[in-house]
Amino acid sequence: MKILHILNDGPTHLSDEITGVQAGLNEIRIIDLAKRDSSYEDIIDAVFLCDRVISW
């Protein structure tokens, strides 16, 4: 399963733990909006390419 994590305020201890556990069985992609290095188009593409989207 492809899982996208969108981090609004950057990574936290909890988000790091959860993505680490999920990475063992799934394909994980993380977009950190605090870094502002992803374009709107890249974010929308990632949302539609992944099976599950989690926003923090």
Image: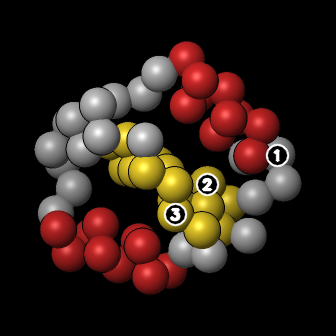
Task: Identify the residue under disc 2.
Answer: 28
Q: Earlier in the sequence, mark 2 or mark 3?
A: 2
Quarter holding residue 20: top right
Q: Is residue 28 left or right of residue 55?
A: right
Local packing at callout 1 (Cα closer than 10 Å; few below 14, some 14-19, many 20+) is: few
Camera-near label (2 vs 3) is 3
Q: Position of residue 47 (x, y in %)?
A: 42, 73
- Mark 3, Cα crowd under 10 Å, few <14 / some 14-19 / many 20+, is some
| Location of residue 2 in the rendering, given as x and y in whole percent from the top left corner | 65, 68
Residue at label 3?
Answer: 53
Quarter of the figure that contains the N terminus: bottom right
Q: Residue at x 44, y 82 (%)?
A: 48
Badge 3 marks a residue whose secondary structure is strand
Residue, far right: 25
What's the residue type where badge 2 is placed?
Ile
Q: Amino acid at mark 3?
A: Val
Q: Earlier in the sequence, mark 1 or mark 3?
A: 1
* Residue 11 falls left or right of residue 27: left
Q: Can you say whether 25 is above or below 43 in the image?
A: above
Label 2 to label 1: alpha-carbon separation: 9 Å
Q: CA distance from mark 1 to mark 3?
A: 17 Å
| Residue 4 position within the rendered picture, expressed as x and y whole percent measured from the top left | 52, 59
Q: Amino acid at mark 1?
A: Gly
Q: Nearer the viewer, mark 1 or mark 3?
A: 3
Tell me which residue sits at (47%, 21%) in the image: 12
Q: Is residue 51 above or below residue 32?
A: below
* 11 vs 31: above or below: above
Q: Identify the residue under disc 1.
A: 24
Q: Position of residue 53 (x, y in %)?
A: 52, 63
